[in-house]
Image (cartoon, rainbow, N blue to C red):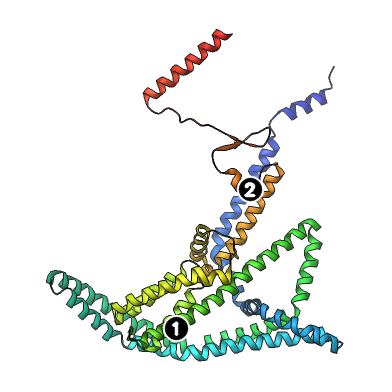
Amino acid sequence: MQDPDQQNKIKFRDRPHYFQWGLTAFCVIVLSVIVVFLLQWLPGIWKVFKKLLRILSPFIYGFVMAYLLMPVFNGLYRRLQPRLSQRMKNGTRIAKGLSSILTLLIGIAVVGILLWMVLPQLVVSIFSLLESMDSYLDEISGWVAALLKDNPVIERNFMQIYDQFSRQVIDWVQNIALPQLVALMTGVVTTVSVLMDLLIGVIIALYILNSKDTFCAQAKKLTYSLFSVRRANRIMSRVNYIHRVFGGFITGKLIDSLIIGVICFVGLRMMIGFGLMTMDQSFALLISVIIGVTNIIPFFGPFIGAIPSTILIMVISPVQALYFVIFILALQQFDGNILGPKILGNSTGLSSFWVMFAILLFGGVFGFAGMAVGVPLFAVLYSMVTEGINYLLEKRGLSQDTNDYRGKSRIDPETHHFVEVREEAPPVSAKERRRAAEKARAAQQEEKKKD
């Protein structure tokens, strides 16, 4: 006779696991309540997050400056460290200090020279454009009237729309754009606050450059203390990959954009010198800055910079705008096919489709900064997802090569090898369904005869 306790255990084991179901339902309810509270508190959380970013802005500035100047620091340190370590007892420490100071001085000198060269002419060109807006709009009006003189009805309707548009543009420039520009340039409180953050950021960058080896050692020590050796090694490999992708892409893109901006400025000055353009020479600098800054954005950058620049030149002369478009197309072909691949190479490993997807996604969420860093960030996420998929396939004993999955082949569940599958389209019309039914009945009858 069987033990009653054993029978109860068997019955409980055969029944559905009500306890697990209840625990799952309880966890779902708790998580739903937490999500609802988070959605209600989201504005407050966002305010606290923005305030925290504002407090930590000097550290963010310092980290960005140190990260961008890291290649210069490494080059100086590799040159100074062997010489000073042979002559002095504390040569390594002195080499780090000198390399950090020289790197910051080089960075400050480069930024100062660029601002000294660009900022005055940039301000002059912007104010000159705003002051001459009326005359430029009148020139466009006369050009359109001469073009449509044989069509008085179209000319009258177009001029009504154009007059309304020009009045709105002039009102926006005089009452909104110009006062905001003046306030931005003369805002003492904001300027002092930003300058203080930048000054503290420079000091923080100096500490980061001088102590980066110590910080890396501490981070490695913490990683090995929290994770297993195998997982810690994978984390450090992933961090090295992130550093290689971000460092190579951002540094290369900045150099590439600087070169494109300089080439654009030289080309516009040459076109002005040969008489192909009659605009003021200060506008050449303004347009070159726009082209250089927007070129930081992959794929869409040339179009984003060319559109406002073309509109700016079209105000002066539509024919000159056409010359500019041809010049920009040639410049971007040179950048995309020759200069860009030489400097950047394939640092992200993404196809054009995923580059476009990353720019639209992160640009829509984070704005200009998201468009600039969205490609390397998505490249890192793409690599992590690919690594996870390959790990799961390896555990199941399946192929990790994407080319093996092309075509109509399927994986055999027993051998785990790809086999060709011949799929027939299901019958759609009534006639096809009758034929399929007749074939099925004929096959059944043949099987019965064989039996």
Q: Could you tell me the amino acid type at mark 2?
A: Asp
Left or right position of 266 against 222: left
Q: In the rendered image, which quarter is residue 69 located in? A: bottom right
Tell me: 158 left or right of 58: left
Front-most of 40 and 372?
372
Rate crowding at label 2 as few (under 14), some (14 to 19) or many (20 or more) other CA atoms within 10 Å. few
Residue drawn at (36%, 86%), measured in percent from left and top?
272
Residues at circles 1 and 2 in contact by the CB criterion of under 8 Å? no
Q: Which residue is mark 1?
A: 265
Which one is earlier in the sequence, the residue at label 1 or at label 2?
1
Q: Secondary structure at mark 1?
A: helix
Q: CA distance from mark 1 to mark 2?
A: 47 Å
Query: What amino acid type is highlighted by mark number 1?
Result: Phe
In percent of width and height, residue 297 lies at 50, 70
Residue 81 position (above or below residue 224) = below
Q: Which residue appears farthest toward the right when viewing the image?
A: 89
Label 2: state its secondary structure.
Answer: loop
Q: Which residue is mark 2?
A: 401
Res. 367 visible in picture: no
Residue beneath the point at 51% across and 32% down: 423
The quadrant in which the N terminus is found is: top right
Q: Would you say residue 171 is visible in this rendering? A: yes
The structure residue drawn at horizontal position 45% and vertical position 29%, both measured from the top left corner, is: 426
